[in-house]
Image (spheres, rainbow, N blue to C red):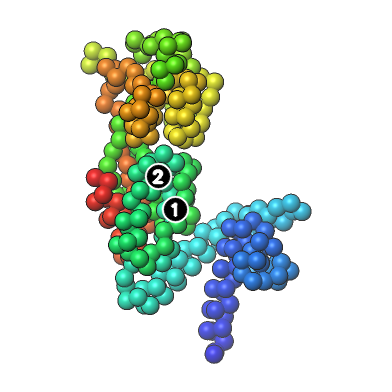
Amino acid sequence: MNAKMTGDSDRARALELFAAVAGEGSFSAAGRKLGLTPSAVSRAIDRIEARLGVRLLLRTTRALALTAEGQAYLSAARRILADLDDAEQAIADQGAPRGRLRVSASLAHGRQCIVPLLGDFVRLHPHILVDISLTDTVVDVAGGQADVAIRFGPLADSGLTARKLGETRRVIVASPDYLACHGTPQVPEDLHEHACLNFNFRRVEPVWPFRRDGRDYALAVRGSIEANNGETLAQLATAGVGITRVGAFSVVERIAAGRLVPILEQYNPGDVEAIHAVFVGGANTPARVRAFVDFLAERLQ
């Protein structure tokens, strides 16, 4: 084996090792994953930093933290490792979809709409390993944290490819017990006298949209609890804690069972959100990503 081939192999191994350290959060955990001792992992990181001439990790007695250069190196490492994996898989299976597919979906929509479809998908594509994470945290698809992410509402400008999967309406709901105790709002302004359960996302203003006599307007609402996902808000509303506004898909079962009641529907302005699958597109998009997005587009629409 010539020196260049050895060097390329060493650098690929270095990328894998650094990604493991960043993902596991410690030298010892990364060592267990790769079958190395913590000291061997530490020395390997030292060699990478020496070769690059920058510090990638800040080491303390309790944790490891990525520097800005470390974050950039991690993003590049994940992309390169994914490309290597795709190339090897394409050659091994002559282009058929295979390999690990990392999917990020929201808690409620993932549980109710995505997870029930996964059995059919893996029966169609038995060589694909679906690695799904349910979280309402926005993951960095371009940075390699997921292959496909399901997003709601307006999309931020980015280099990602988006494919519309459908849309969902928003609905304001409360439990029968809450309404019996506090009264049912008759007009949107009555919400000022109620506990409104809201999302805590910075990008979302604490206002709810309404339409009266053909005029759209937004109403500021307040309450004592905020959450980062609709599943939690629906659970709180069902427990009688307050009134919330969430995607209809996340409460359809509770409404059908009578545990939640839609309110102020006559003032609903046709409040809908688009649902998209976002991924890194282009000619080199892995076959497994294309297969999954096509599958969702067919089943969800």
**Tag 1, which secondary structure?**
strand
Q: Residues within 10 Å of mark 1 (few under 14, many from 20)?
A: some
Asked if one can make out residue 197 in the rendered structure from this viewpoint, the answer is no
Distance, label 2 to label 1, CA atoms, is 9 Å
Quadrant of the image occupied by residue 185: top left
Q: Quadrant of the N terminus?
A: bottom right
Q: Between residues 138 and 231, which one lies in front from this camera angle? A: 231
Q: Is residue 226 left or right of residue 183?
A: right
The reply to whether discs 2 and 1 touch (Cβ–Cβ < 8 Å) is yes
**Tag 2, which secondary structure?**
helix
Q: Quadrant of the C terminus?
A: top left
Asked if one can make out residue 163 in the rendered structure from this viewpoint, the answer is yes
Which residue: 74% across, 51% down?
Answer: 62
The residue beneath circle 1 is 132
Which residue: 32% across, 61% down?
Answer: 123
Residue type at numbered disc 1? Ile
Q: Residue 165's spot in the image, x, y percent?
A: 28, 46
Q: Is residue 33 left or right of residue 228?
A: right
Say if 11 sits above or below 217 in the image: below
Quadrant of the image occupied by residue 16: bottom right
Say if 42 sits above or below 266 in the image: below
Residue type at numbered disc 2? Gly
Q: Mark number for residue 110?
A: 2
Q: Between residues 211 and 166, which one lies in front from this camera angle? A: 166
